[in-house]
Each structure stands twice: as C-alpha cells, then as structure tokens.
Image: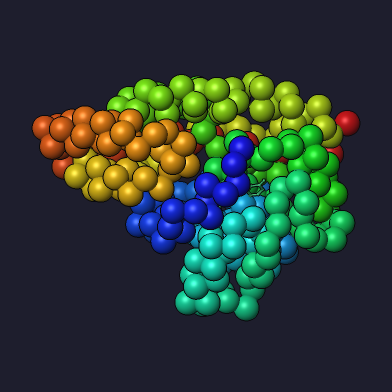
Amino acid sequence: MNNSLYNEGGIHLRYERARGLSEATLNLWLERLSAHVPREDIRTIIDLGCGTGRFSVALARHFSARVYGIEPSPKMLSAAREAVNASPVQASVVLMEGTAERIPLDDKTAEMLFLSMVYHHIVDKELACAEFKRVLKPPGHLCIRTATRERIDSFLWLRFFPEAREIESRRMLSGRELKTFIEARGFRLAAHEVVRQMFAGDLNEYYERISERALSVLQMIPDETFARGLLALGEHCATHDTGQPVCEEIDLFVFRADGV
Ligand SMILES: C[S@@+](CC[C@H](N)C(=O)[O-])C[C@H]1O[C@@H](n2cnc3c(N)ncnc32)[C@H](O)[C@@H]1O
C-alpha cells in the first residue's frame, strides 16, 4: 500500500473535519476497549499509525497511560503534534516517525498496542507481526480496529463509488483471514466484536464529510470517477435526509501475545 497517500494532497489538513469522531463515539471505543483490556494492566500504549492523534490523546486520558504515537507521514504527525500540544495530556504523549514494519521502540515497551484503520495499509504484515511481538510486554494486548470485508456494505458511501468498493473488497481481509494470519504468528484471539458507530449526525453532514476526500481509497480512484460518485451521493443525501444519524460498522479484535 502507498504510505504517501497520507502525506500528499493536504489530507492531514482535512482529516479531522472529514473523519474526526464525536466525544460520544470516542468514548464508545474507549469503553469497548476497556471491556477487554483491564485498565489496571496498562501503563504504556503504542498507537501505531496514529495519524492526527485522534486516539492517542483519548487513550492517554482514559487509561492514564503514557502513549507513543508512531506514524510514517510527517504531515499527519505534525497535525498530531498540534492536537497533542493543545490537550491536557501533552506530557503523556510522545510522537515519533516510524512504521509497523519498523517500530522505533525498545523490546517489551508497552502492555497495549493499538491500531486504528491501519492494518490494511501495512505492506509487510509478516514483519509487522514480529514487531508487534517484540514491542509488547507479554502477555500484551494487541487491539486492532479495522473494517473487515464483511463490513463493507455498512458503508453507505461505497455504494456510490463502485471502483473504490472493488479496491476495498480486495484489500480488506475477512475476519477469518485476519484471525488466522495473526494467530499463526504467536497471538491468541481474546475478543472480537462489531461496533456500530455514528459517523455523521445526518445525511447532509455525511455528504460534507465524504466530499473532503480524506478516505485513502477515494484518493486511489481517478478524479472524474470521484466527481461522478460524489454527484450521485449528493443527490441521494439531498433526497433522503430525514435528520437521522448515519452509522457504520467497524470490527474490534483483541489478541494476546501469549499464543504459540
Ligand atoms: C486511516 S489513517 C488512521 C489514523 C489513526 N489511526 C486514526 O484512526 O485516526 C491510516 C494511517 O496509517 C498510516 N500508515 C500507513 N502505512 C503505515 C505503516 N506501514 N505503518 C504504520 N502506519 C501506517 C497512515 O500514514 C495513516 O496516518
């Protein structure tokens, strides 16, 4: 996958506007995480592929933990730096350039490794799994927030961009594929759930968010194709808006690093 997608075209400036999560949605994720990961177990967390740091700050606050935000895109990292500096947990969050394949941290650094919408971007998943094992303090919690192939149809916008849907169905793993791959590399699945999150308050806001083109797959399709899909989505949103929130489904996997 092309890591530079997040370092080009000003995506770092639009990301929060397009993909920022409400306080309620962030809290929902923190609550689901702590249903599987005891807060008292956690002193240090690695937020791998932290992007603009939307989870780094929330994780530091919720778990009262030190957080290392690791991110390959210098521009996303600079947006994260601004967010962290403006937060009350500034002293607990350390941001560093790095990738899943090469995590710039010592062995056994953290009790928890968190990846949000990053797994499908990792080019060398074999190497990344070895890094996950290395930086986790056993038994360690590997938490993966991702959309598996089974969730694709819960994303309304993908119905209007068939070329993007095609790419997503190729690059997203099924839940079984993800579990099998990671378990074969020394982890054990401790929990898996599907979380239904609110993405926009209504269809009007939904359209505004998608039109920012801050989803990586929408950068991967040609401009004309994007424009055509956006027009159709706009018509749909204008004619179907009932003021109801727009939700989507995202998987949460929690693995322990004590598998064989
Ligand atoms: C969809 S964004 C998610 C950002 C953040 N985790 C969040 O949930 O807001 C994907 C992020 O993964 C980063 N990324 C891409 N390839 C990566 C890799 N090999 N290792 C770590 N992060 C990577 C991108 O630069 C981007 O910031």
Taking the view exactly as shown, the residue that stands out farthest to the left is 239
For the point 21% across and 40% down, the residue is 203
Does 53 appear above or below 216?
below
Picture coordinates of residue 5, whole percent (x, y): 52, 47
Picture coordinates of residue 128, whole percent (x, y): 76, 42
Picture coordinates of residue 72, whole percent (x, y): 64, 55
Query: Left or right: where does residue 100 sit relative to residue 51?
Result: right
Quarter residue 89 falls in: bottom right
Q: Quadrant of the C terminus?
A: top right
For the point 57% across and 76% down, the residue is 90
Picture coordinates of residue 29, whole percent (x, y): 50, 49
For the point 49% across and 70% down, the residue is 83
For the point 41% across and 48% down, the residue is 214
Q: Nearer the viewer, residue 259 or 4?
A: 4
Q: Nearer the viewer, residue 112 or 54?
A: 54
Residue 59 in view (yes/no)? no
Residue 181 in view (yes/no)? yes
Query: Left or right: where does residue 12 sit relative to residue 228?
Result: right
Q: Nearer the viewer, residue 113 or 156?
A: 156
